[in-house]
Image (cartoon, rainbow, N blue to C red):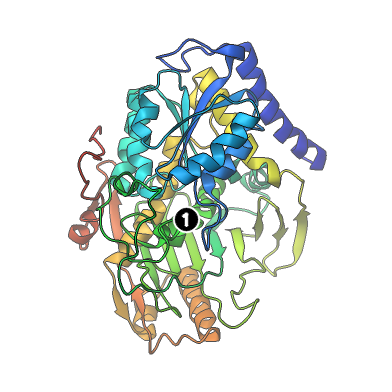
Amino acid sequence: MNLSSRREFLKTTIAAAGAALTTRGLRAASANRVAGANDAVRVAVIGLGDTKAIGGVGGRGHQLIASLLQAPNARIAALCDVDESFLAREAQPLKDKGHDVVTHRDLRRVFDDKSIDAVVVATPNHWHGLATVWACQAGKDVYVEKPFSHNLWEGKQMVAAARKHGRIVQTGTQNRASPLLREAFAELHGGSLGRIRFAHAIMYRARDGIGRVGAPPAVPASIDYDLWCGPAPKAPLRRKQLHYEWHWFWDTGNGEIGNNGVHMIDLCRMALRSTALPTRGMSIGGRFAVDDAAETANTQVALLAFEPAPLICEIRNVRKAGPEAIGKVRNRNRGVIIDCENGYFAGDATGGAFYDRQDKQIKAVKPDGTGGRLEVAHLSNFLAAVRSRKSADLICEAWEGHCSAAAAHLANISYRIGRTAAPDAIRERIRGERELTDAFERCREHLRDNGVDLGKTPAVLGPWVTLDAKQTRFTGEFAEGANALLKRQYRAPFVVPEIA
């Protein structure tokens, strides 16, 4: 596939979605509604996001609205957010464009609306599971942002809800729509570099600490805090900023590995052609170089057992010594490295290259101009599957999202039940795992370059945790502690029902 054919692939993906939407009629797109004007799929966006939050990227729901407006035959019919100021911010521009948009603070009102065909769930992570299950029960199709789930048990119920109610559920890991990566991985699958030895997910992104508060700050009056908390405990804020910083607390987020790391984990699984949950995982990491209230690791190395090859994920947020201090591995600070017997591929949706074992470039994979359209293509693929009623048409169906999120969950569970250990003890524990040892040494050097001595500020060494994928239960020596983190204690009435 050359440059022009890659572009054609992306155009075809979007065009095919449009053709499906305009020619087939809205057969069963919602069990509750007959097709509306122009057979457009009526979409509700749930969770709009703070476009000005420190550390954020501009509000995820806000971004998805812009992409939906470019997708063929999507009609944004409703907006939902617990923050009234966000509703006002998004609704008027849509009305100015001719969209007859209703607004809700409570997502249950969206699910009660029989005119809505599909929902986009861009809430904080702790709402992903319940929002998806409730949507499926209400006969809505779902595009749910990454990570697919907030915990492993929840992910299992989300997949079961999609199956039970016959819904189309897509996970928002839009890099899977990249024709560039599909071409690169197809070349690897053809055996050009021999057998795949391991996959390497890299996410190095500098982040500042979030600080501490002496007393819980007041929640802005525009926010329904009870609804914001939903399934999570309704507790006083322990941070300055309600929005976005929820990523760094276990009750609501999954840390950087579940935030941006899961994008690269998902691409590694795509390269491995893995279709199963990870069976084992372990993690080394900590929260270094900041004194703040956050709970999740800002530096993490995880090894995850997949078939046909293991997956290593490296997360770095620490950068104290200058612009280049975040570091690189094989000249990458984000993306994937697929290591094979006779070389490797290093890149992401913006491009990359194939290399031999001596790091000499064999072939460049140049940017093809499709990167900025991947989100539109991914949403278009979802909308086309809404029309076709074929989950197999989806680029990242619910099960794929569940497997990728599960990798982040296994790493975090290992980390959370781990204990601090001296560098020598860590080296001894992971002796025999060459790639993991190399990743740990890179991590230690990176931290040292940024003023962190693991001899004085030790990392957490998490144990190997073993997952019985069929039962979704951990087994073995550390099963009790790991199983305690399989699911959360839900706060009534925001309880994810047990379906499977």
> For mark 1, what is the residue?
259
Query: How many numbered circles are shown?
Result: 1
Picture quadrant of residue 342: bottom right
Task: Name the amino acid, label 1.
Answer: Asn
Image side of residue 400 versus residue 186, left or right: left
Q: Quadrant of the N terminus?
A: top right
Rendered position, 98 above or below 324: above
Farthest residue, direction bottom:
456
Q: Position of residue 69 (x, y in %)?
A: 64, 32
Q: Residue at x 28, y 70 (%)?
A: 418
Does residue 113 appear anywhere in the picture?
yes
Q: Residue at x 41, y 85 (%)?
A: 454
Image side of residue 15 versus residue 239, left or right: right
Tell me if mark 1 has few (under 14), some (14-19) or many (20+) residues whose alpha carbon lies within 10 angstroms of its own: some
Picture quadrant of residue 108: top left
Q: Position of residue 401 (x, y in %)?
A: 45, 42
Does residue 340 appear anywhere in the picture?
no
In what element is the residue under mark 1? Answer: helix
Q: Quadrant of the C terminus?
A: top left
Farthest residue, direction right:
4
Q: Position of residue 465 (x, y in %)?
A: 29, 60
Q: Position of residue 399 (x, y in %)?
A: 42, 37
Q: Residue at x 51, y 69 (%)?
A: 316
Name the foreground residue: 153 vs 146.
146
Name the foreground residue: 405 vs 473.
405
Farthest residue, direction left:
480
